[in-house]
Amino acid sequence: MASNGRIQITFERERKTLRSLLSFFNRGFRIEVADDHAVVPQVDLSKAQTYLASLTAKHGPLALSDLAIETDAVATLLLDGPALLALASGNARARAYLGWAVRSKTRVVVPATAFLDPAVAAIASAVADVVPIYASTAEVAAGLLAGSRLALPFDALVVALASKMRPAAILTRDAAGIGALARAVDQKGVLVFSL
């Protein structure tokens, strides 16, 4: 509480996010305006396999109960920032989902926004293909935000990106926020996997 008896509100998280955005753009990254309906590249899981092997060497094999993942057909598994951090820390569910993606030959991707957080950026390119955010994806995200009462711009970008890669699944620690936005897409084909 502030000395005047009022609750003092700080915007530390927002300040850090804005600072990260400025850093992101100063490093030469940009939102691309291009045709994002181009041919999807062939699935290359070598990064995911290599990273999964390093996690197994570091944390040991998974229990059989962690490996029992059954879901609808998914062409793309999109990992958000918190999921990448969980994966790097050896989270068994995150490892199991990555293992499932490798076994089922599901494309594993991370959004370019992962590079806004230095801790996540170090992991992102080691695990999966980085997918750029196009203007049309940003427009879908803006529509999701306008249609919801949530102020989660990065989550909206993740959901918008997944909606363009359907059938897709998003691996996240924020199943409530991501799930609400995924339901707002108003079309089937975007699943949310919670850690």
Image (spheres, rainbow, N blue to C red):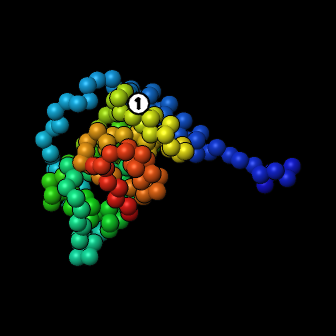
Image coordinates of residue 118 in percent, x first then y, are 43, 44
Q: Residue at horizontal 78%, vertical 55%?
A: 1
Q: Which residue matches tag 1? A: 139
Q: Residue furthest front?
A: 186
Q: Which amino acid lies under the numbered mark 1 shown in the image of this protein?
A: Glu
Q: Nearer the viewer, residue 54 or 189?
A: 189
Count of numbered badges drawn on the protein: 1
Q: Residue furthest top?
A: 33
Quarter-of-image position of residue 37: top left
Q: Residue at horizontal 24%, vertical 62%?
A: 71
Horizontal arrangement in the rendering, residue 9 relative to residue 172 (left or right):
right
Q: Residue furthest bottom?
A: 64
Q: Is residue 62 in view?
A: no
Q: Residue furthest right?
A: 4
Image coordinates of residue 79 in percent, x first then y, are 33, 51
Image coordinates of residue 21 in percent, x first then y, are 48, 34
Quarter-of-image position of residue 131: top left
Give the quadrant of the C terminus: bottom left
Q: Residue at horizontal 58%, vertical 41%?
A: 14
Q: Is residue 7 in view?
A: yes
Horizontal arrangement in the rendering, residue 28 relative to residue 101 (left or right):
right
When the figure is inspected, residue 156 is found, relative to residue 38, above or below; the finding is: below
Q: Residue at horizontal 45%, vertical 34%?
A: 142
When the figure is inspected, residue 6 is found, relative to residue 63, above or below; the finding is: above
Disc 1 is placed on an element classified as helix
Q: Give neighbour class at mark 1: few <14, some 14-19, many 20+ (Cα, 10 Å).
A: few
Image coordinates of residue 23 in percent, x first then y, are 47, 32
